[in-house]
Image (cartoon, rainbow, N blue to C red):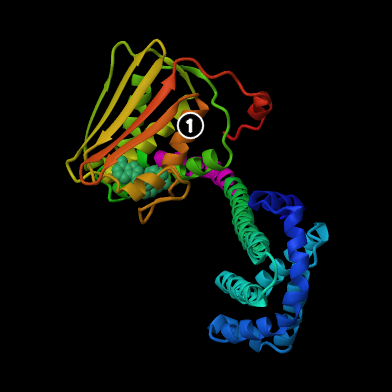
Amino acid sequence: MNVTLFENLKQFVGFSDADVEHLRDLAAVLEPHFPDVATRLYREAQRDPAGRKILAAPAAGAALRQALLVWLRSLCSGSYDADYFHSRAQVGRTHVRVGVPQYLVIAALEIIWQELSQTVVAAGIAAPQAKLAALHKLFMVETALMLESYRESHTAEVRQIEREALEDKLREAEQLAQVGQLAASLAHEIKNPLAGISGAIQVIRAGLKPSDAHYPVLGEVLRQINRLDRSVKDLLVYARPRPPQYQRCDLSRAVERVLTLLRKEPEFERVKFEYSVARHCPPIAADENQLEQLLVNLLMNAAQASAPGGLVRLTAVGDADGVQLVVQDHGCGMTPEVLRRALEPFFTTKARGTGLGLPICRKIAEAHGGRLSLRSTPGVGTEVTVELPEQPPAPAAGADDEHTRSDR
Ligand SMILES: Nc1ncnc2c1ncn2[C@@H]1O[C@H](COP(=O)(O)OP(=O)(O)OP(=O)(O)O)[C@@H](O)[C@H]1O
Ligand SMILES: [Mg+2]
């Protein structure tokens, strides 16, 4: 609140030099009544629980009464300048600070107005109407200033709340980034030994006959290693994204490879799978590993959402601009709340989910200059569409440095 507001208010109510004179004339008439005004005001305030509480504070009653008398005296002082405004602003801030409710302040101004206007009428002075009009204008200004103190404090409170919320978010983001870095380092450490273990088990299994009791056990071990490998890769892509390493990709081949991988998964064994890659679908510039990761995540989600025997369909169509991949299922679908949050990192409704699958798919799509969108109806099914341009997007500044920090 600044003095300009005060000047604008005076102008708005038409507060003139003549009003200043009228108010000066009233000083002598009103001053003897100020103690009575204060007495009535505090009597009325006692009827309100909040008023009683404020007046009950040690020394508050006397201090407030003193402040009120000062306030009343300056009302007819005739000097409605910056000092006057600042003293009013100070009173307003004090009211806010000691917790006087806004309604009590408005009620108090009304009581003071009644008392003073009745005194003017009863005094039998010259031109009472003009003097009352001047007093009334000043009361309008006073009321507006009081309200402004509350508005200001409310705005400050809202800002403070917003600032705290933002700080919380930043802290959370920093913590998440730290956890992400730690997880990424761990994942990096796990990836290579895991590949070694997987290779060794495949060699042992290849030496066994399928009738051997250990043969299916090792098959299960390999499946679990695959699962672990996927989670580790997801985490790495999420925590340390790297720019796509572009190469010409034939979609049919990528889908075939993904399917070979997925057909070993129990979730995938339960569903029927159909795919069609349109003949005119052009090869696109993409990172084959990332593209496969995207397909695996979307197809796994679709399979996990489907009832046994459910149909999961992948279609790819394209033209000179790029391709559109659609993964469709007739599974449980998503509620509006799940749909809203499905792309948030770590959001999952699954007991063993990490909640990174979809966010990673989106990251991969966007890194390729494309986009991912979801459509889902509970009980009907889900459709995930990924659009990828035929050409890679122009590299961002500094992208070359990133290549040297590649994780794979
Ligand atoms: N096809 C789908 N049908 C129904 N719900 C889905 C589908 N795909 C994703 N969701 C919902 O979105 C959530 C987030 O999916 P996302 O792939 O990110 O993580 P997740 O599948 O839970 O875990 P993860 O992929 O790490 O195993 C899922 O938990 C599920 O509730
Ligand atoms: Mg998933």
Decide whether the magenta segment is chiefly helix, strand or loop. Answer: helix
342 on left or right of 66? left
Residue placed under numbered mark 1 in the picture: 364
Q: Give the quadrant of the N terminus.
A: bottom right
The total number of labels drawn is 1
Name the residue: 65% across, 77% down: 119
Name the residue: 46% across, 43% down: 229
In the rendered image, residue 195 lying in the magenta stretch gets the answer yes
**Residue toward you, 265 or 40:** 40
Q: Name the spot of residue 105 as percent of width and height, x first.
A: 61, 71
Task: For residue 390, say whether it is visible.
Answer: yes
Decide: few, some or many residues near mark 1? Use Cα within 10 Å; few <14, some 14-19, many ≥20. many
Name the residue: 42% across, 40% down: 358
Task: For residue 218, say whether it is visible.
Answer: no
Three-letter amino acid code of the residue under disc 1: Ile
**Whether residue 172 is situated above or below residue 256 in the rendered picture:** below
**Residue toward you, 96 or 165:** 96
Mark 1 lies on a secondary structure that is helix
Read off the magenta span. 186-203
Residue 92 quadrant: bottom right
Q: Give the quadrant of the C terminus.
A: top right
Ligand 1, by image quadrant, is: top left
**Whether residue 200 is situated above or below residue 99 in the rendered picture:** above
Residue placed furthest toward the left: 309
